[in-house]
Image: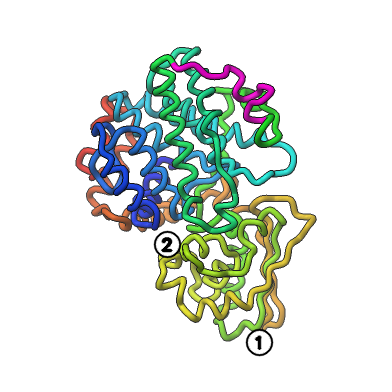
Amino acid sequence: MLMLDTLAVAWSGSSAPGAPEAHALLVDEGGRADSTVWSFGGKLPATSATFVNSIAGAALDYDGVDCVHGAVVALPAALSLAERERTSGKDFLAAYVIGSDLCSRFGGAITGEHKGWYTTSIYGAFGAAATAAKLLGLDATATCNALGLCLSQAAGTQQSNIEQALSKRLQPAFAARAGVFSALLAQKGISAPREAIEGRFGMFALYQEGEPYRIIENLGQRFEHENTAIKKYPCCACTHASVEAALGLVREYDLKPEDVTAIEVRHSPFMHRLVGSPFNPGENPQVSAQFSAQYTVACALLRRQMTVADIQEGAIFDPAIRLIADRIRVVVEDGWTSNRAPASVTMTTRQHGTISRTTEKFPWSPEDPPTDAALQEKLAACFSEGVNPLTAERRARLVDRVNDIESVQDMSEFFEGVI
């Protein structure tokens, strides 16, 4: 499910700002034709293909999320290296699970106040390196070196989110590429610190306070990436609970924009940091829309949805949406500590008085996953968009190949007949 979801959102995200530009740059640089570039077609060196595919997967903020966005890091790395090394589907799947699980384990080991690092990019490289090390058949020493090399490349900040810059959607790609590159360097015998994670100047000492030994607790027995949530809406996870609450009110009371005179959104300080600023399309309208509680809730009232169509420029600059967004008041609940839920929406209406709804859980969380019909609807919509929309026949071929991944003998043939 995660594999299909990540491929689908990357297909749709291939035409989003940032992805075509990065693809053009790396095509111009050239190199060995090792790994397929999703949606765009053609092949690039494994590190380059990993980078572009990860950008496309992250661009719409529609990819799966746990404490990190592990799928959009581990899957591009795994598919690129599996294709380059012509591994079996079983070996690919093992490597993908290892990388996804480690991404979640790193993120889950955080303690203390969140300092503003972008956890996907500082931890994702380690998951991608583990994925690549598995596919390259590295021994314990080389694998340790691959992880150690990631420490020298780990970087990423929520400043990109706050300023709503396109670099936000590049940060998982930096991590994915760094992981693959680190494993390739380790394969050549490049050494690195052995205590990159728990050392005096290792990852947790320098970046974000945490408990590094939680990373290996029940490793291989409990798989933390199973806590990944498929995203219901193409926007920052911090907006989902308020969108869900707003849509619930709109549908329950059959509200029209003219029925509502005031709207208030309440969420946690962490959520407010990322999505609570006044809506301003700025230089990057799509990113601004995705990271705005005001814009996404306004979409719920005006259009009764929050879809990929709602983060296109025509929708973002619709004067009707701005009129609603500018009237939405956002309140910080200091006692709420969660990153994604709860969130509450209160609307003052002409016919129903003051009405409120609170979303207690993140929509489509593992405890309340999407129905098969809802997931299929998302997949079909996403695969039908981007720079190279898939026909129903090609989409069915890709879905069948994913569902039958363990029988694939040579992953270099995985995308044949699809792109």
Disc 2: CA contacts within 10 A as few (<14), some (14-19) or many (>=20): many
The mark that comes first in sequence, 2 or 1, is 2
Q: Position of residue 322 (x, y in %)?
A: 53, 77
Q: Is residue 285 left or right of residue 368?
A: left
Q: Quadrant of the N terminus?
A: top left
Tell me the residue at 70%/64% (across/down).
Answer: 266
Image height of 222 relative to 15, above or below: above
Q: Is residue 37 left or right of residue 290?
A: left
Task: Give the labeled residue for mark 1.
Answer: 350
Q: Which residues are magenta?
A: 190-204
Q: Nearer the viewer, residue 377 or 63?
A: 63
Which SS type dominates the magenta stretch? loop
Q: Is residue 258 magenta?
A: no
Disc 1: CA contacts within 10 A as few (<14), some (14-19) or many (>=20): few
Q: Position of residue 386 (x, y in %)?
A: 32, 56
Mark 1 residue type: Arg
User: Which residue appears farthest toward the left when viewing the image?
Assistant: 417
Mark 2 residue type: Val
Q: Is residue 197 magenta?
A: yes
Q: Is residue 398 left or right of residue 234?
A: left
Residue 308: numbered disc:
2
Q: Position of residue 105 (x, y in %)?
A: 60, 32
Disc 2 to disc 1, C-alpha distance: 31 Å
